[in-house]
């Protein structure tokens, strides 16, 4: 059983029963899951949460599944670490990293959204699942569909990184590369979802999918000792994660689980080569002008973001801001995080680190602000992005070793 009442349109308030649905029939806006928060507050306490296993299902009353989860049992419960070495470089005093680059089973935050969507597909008795993906979602849907023993139709842009293609195909999923960008892929998936009785996790299962992202925010608050941060910096593709983190904190506040109120400013991060949400925020508008993506941050390369309007709105209303960074700055961000905190993140993480640096430089985030960086994916999947000098090669002789270290690092 769950506390879900139904689905509701974010724009016009139109209500729908729980089911497969891509958006509002009247105004085409995204749908939100509506919960009975009264009921939830009677059954969910800090103690209940803490008595459960360290995975995303600790917050299951706040997730839209009816039955016990069958997939995603190892998902969530990722580390929140203090990042003092990185903080020193930013001139920050209170910096944390929420590290979903080590999420299970496929090393990105997408495992959270997929876990909810695939469980929901099982509950709906669907014959097959699928997705339009910029890479990480493809990996995660493929793995979880294998676990659920459902065929998975996975559509990706033709130019995806090799690691992300391999880490999708390996699970026996039905992968199709599309000559076009993500927005072309997504349009095709919408058409397929109309013709076949399948669940596309980010199309007709999207209202449920998005809810999985909330657990990223729930965990941050719990790991900070039931407090909401002052600032959180989040990479944006479709714009879902950033608004769901904010929703998660507000839910905890409403349920009386937090010390103090939620005054969290949410900051959005994109690549300069695909920055439609940042552009809207800077214009002081919620209206997204679609762009054609051109960036190494392929996991964020959505030119026409489904939740862009909502993301821009929540950024502004929370008192936050949004910034974008060049491909060069992204690579520098990846290297900086690796060299200071020992975390190898993918391009999206490089975007987050580089944008955070900008926000501190601009004084938009202050040194004493309790700030959390959302690190959402793993660097092993986007190795093409960081072109490093190959290490020196020598014969297995001591003399050559001595010569090499003196030449390379001036070690006498
Ligand atoms: C998908 C993705 C995001 C952003 O997700 P949205 O909810 O679509 O904004 C961020 N980081 C990584 C690594 C992703 O794969
Ligand atoms: Zn509507």
Image (cartoon, rainbow, N blue to C red):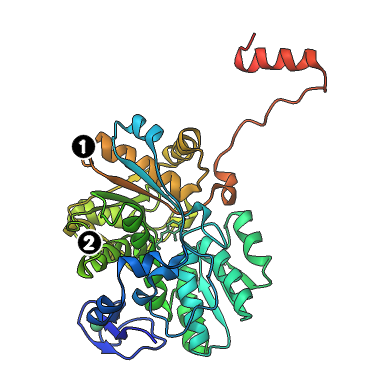
Res 295 seen here: no
Q: Which residue is mark 2?
A: 314
What's the CA distance linking mark 1 and mark 2?
A: 20 Å
Task: Give residue 267's position: percent from left, percent from top.
Answer: 28, 51
Determine whether the residue tagged by mark 2 lies in a helix, strand or loop.
Answer: helix
Task: Give residue 72's position: percent from left, percent from top.
Answer: 53, 70
Task: Give residue 149's position: percent from left, percent from top.
Answer: 64, 80
Quadrant for ligand 1 reads bottom left
Res 85 seen here: yes
Q: Residue at x 59, y 45 (%)?
A: 384
The image shows residue 247, relative to residue 361, as above or below, that is below
Q: Residues within 10 Å of mark 2 (few under 14, many from 20)?
A: many
CB under 8 Å between callouts 1 and 2?
no
User: In the image shown, does 66 or 389 lie closer to the viewer?
Assistant: 66
Q: Quadrant of residue 92?
A: top left
Q: Residue at x 38, y 40 (%)?
A: 354
Q: Quadrant of the C terminus?
A: top right
Q: Quadrant of the N terminus?
A: bottom left
**Label placed on residue 191:** none
Q: Earlier in the sequence, mark 1 or mark 2?
A: 2
The residue positioned farthest toward the top in the image shown: 412
Q: Residue at x 25, y 88 (%)?
A: 15
Q: Quadrant of residue 50?
A: bottom left
Q: Which residue is mark 1?
A: 363
């Amino acid at each position: 059983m769950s506390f879900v009442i139904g689905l509701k349109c974010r724009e016009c308030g139109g209500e729908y029963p729980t089911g497969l649905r891509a958006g509002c029939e009247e105004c085409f806006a995204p749908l939100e899951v509506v919960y009975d928060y009264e009921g939830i507050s009677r059954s969910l306490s800090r103690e209940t949460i803490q008595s459960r296993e360290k995975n995303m299902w600790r917050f299951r009353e706040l997730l839209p599944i009816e039955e016990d989860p069958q997939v995603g049992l190892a998902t969530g419960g990722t580390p929140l670490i203090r990042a003092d070495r990185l903080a020193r470089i930013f001139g920050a005093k209170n910096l944390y990293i929420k590290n979903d680059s080590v999420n299970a089973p496929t090393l990105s935050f997408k495992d959270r959204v997929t876990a909810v969507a695939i469980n929901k597909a099982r509950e709906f008795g669907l014959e097959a699942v699928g997705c339009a993906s910029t890479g990480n979602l493809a990996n995660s849907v493929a793995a979880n569909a294998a676990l659920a023993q459902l065929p998975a139709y996975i559509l990706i842009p033709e130019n995806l990184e090799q690691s992300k293609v391999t880490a999708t195909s390996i699970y026996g999923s039905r992968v199709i590369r599309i000559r076009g960008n993500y927005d072309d892929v997504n349009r095709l998936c919408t058409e397929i979802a109309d013709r076949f009785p399948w669940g596309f996790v980010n199309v007709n299962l999207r209202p449920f999918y998005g809810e999985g992202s909330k657990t990223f925010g729930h965990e941050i608050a719990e790991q900070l000792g039931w407090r909401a941060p002052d600032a959180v910096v989040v990479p944006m593709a479709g714009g879902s994660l950033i608004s769901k983190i904010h929703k998660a904190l507000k839910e905890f506040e409403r349920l009386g689980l937090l010390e103090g109120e939620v005054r969290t400013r949410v900051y959005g991060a994109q690549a300069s080569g695909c920055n439609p949400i940042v552009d809207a925020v800077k214009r002081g508008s919620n209206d997204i002008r679609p762009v054609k993506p051109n960036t190494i941050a392929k996991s964020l390369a959505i030119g026409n973001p489904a939740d862009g309007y909502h993301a821009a709105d929540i950024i502004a209303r929370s008192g936050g801001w949004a910034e974008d960074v060049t491909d060069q700055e992204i690579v520098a961000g990846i290297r900086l995080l690796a060299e200071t905190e020992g975390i190898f993140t993918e391009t999206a993480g490089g975007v987050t680190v580089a944008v955070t640096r900008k926000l501190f430089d601009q004084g938009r985030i202050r040194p004493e602000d309790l700030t959390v960086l959302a690190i959402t994916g793993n660097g092993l999947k986007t190795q093409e992005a960081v072109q490093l000098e190959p290490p020196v090669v020598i014969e297995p002789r001591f003399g050559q070793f001595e010569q090499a270290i003196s030449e390379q690092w001036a070690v006498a």
